[in-house]
Image (cartoon, grey):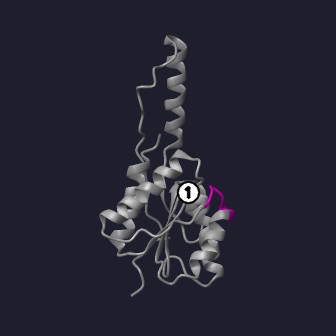
């Protein structure tokens, strides 16, 4: 698995470091372990910073869900930053913010998670937590080959793959 906790912590600490104090979260699906870890870590980071934890916005992994969340959040002038559970949610949210007259990042900073190549070409380019999907694939193939050679594994070993925060144009300090 990717380092979900470390990746979310990097994203939220980036927003906190810019001066944001009202950081909302658009969640992934309720039945996804990654989504649940990202939500819990976001909330823990805000509590550790002494900030209130707002009710997160439910979503899935789609740009359409991000768009709907963005329409809702654009109406709240207190929200200055949004951490989205994945890049597709973030891209949908950015479009909705634009359509509602909220500028990213001048009015609202947005961070995604995954590091999809498309985020580099969005406008503005998306700040995101990059997962190393190629390494995920290599590690999975290695595990399958190991099991083919020596039988089923006992499940005691876990592989945590580091993530990387890619700071691009969708984040900035909050407006004064």
As drawn, 114 above or below 100: above
Q: Which of 164 and 26 is in front in this view?
A: 26
Q: Where is residue 132 in the image (x, y as percent from the top left)?
A: 49, 44
Position of the C terminus, as image quadrant, is bottom left
- Give the left or right position of residue 68, taking residue 34 as reference: right
Is residue 176 depicted above or below 29 in this figure? below
Residue 3 sits in which quadrant? top left
Confirm whether residue 30 shows in the render.
Answer: yes
Q: Which residue lies furthest to the top in this view?
A: 150
Provide residue 13's location: percent of width, then percent of height.
35, 63
Number of residue marks:
1
The answer to whether residue 88 is magenta is no
- Tell me where residue 14 sits by quadrant: bottom left
Q: Give the range drawn in magenta.
A: 59-64
Callout 1 crowding tier (Cα within 10 Å): few <14, some 14–19, many ≥20: many
Tell me, yes or no, if residue 13 can be seen here: no
The single residue placed furthest to the bottom in the displayed view is 176
Q: Name the residue under label 1.
A: 86
| Residue 151 spot, x, y in % from top left | 52, 13
Tell me what residue is drawn at x 48 percent, y 19 percent: 153
* Residue at the image position 55 percent from the left and 15 percent from the top: 148
Q: What element carries label 1?
A: loop
Q: What is the magenta segment's predominant secondary structure?
A: loop
Residue at x 52%, y 54% (from the top left corner): 115
- Residue 158 x/y as whole percent: 42, 32
Q: Residue at x 42, y 34 (%)?
A: 159
């Amino acid at each position: 698995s990717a380092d979900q906790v470390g990746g979310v912590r990097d994203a939220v600490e980036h927003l906190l470091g810019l001066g944001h104090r009202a950081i909302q979260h658009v969640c992934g699906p309720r039945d996804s372990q990654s989504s649940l870890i990202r939500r819990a870590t976001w909330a823990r980071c805000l509590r550790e910073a002494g900030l209130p934890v707002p009710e997160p916005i439910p979503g899935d992994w789609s740009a359409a869900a991000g768009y709907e969340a963005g329409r809702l959040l654009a109406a709240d002038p207190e929200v200055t930053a949004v951490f989205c559970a994945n890049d597709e949610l973030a891209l949908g949210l950015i479009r909705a913010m634009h359509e509602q007259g909220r500028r990213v990042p001048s009015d609202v900073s947005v961070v995604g998670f995954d590091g999809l190549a498309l985020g580099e070409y969005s406008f503005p380019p998306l700040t995101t937590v990059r997962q190393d999907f190629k390494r995920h694939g290599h590690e999975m193939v290695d595990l399958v080959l190991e099991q083919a050679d020596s039988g089923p594994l006992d499940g005691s070993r876990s592989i945590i793959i580091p993530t990387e925060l890619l700071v691009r144009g969708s984040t900035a300090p909050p407006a004064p």
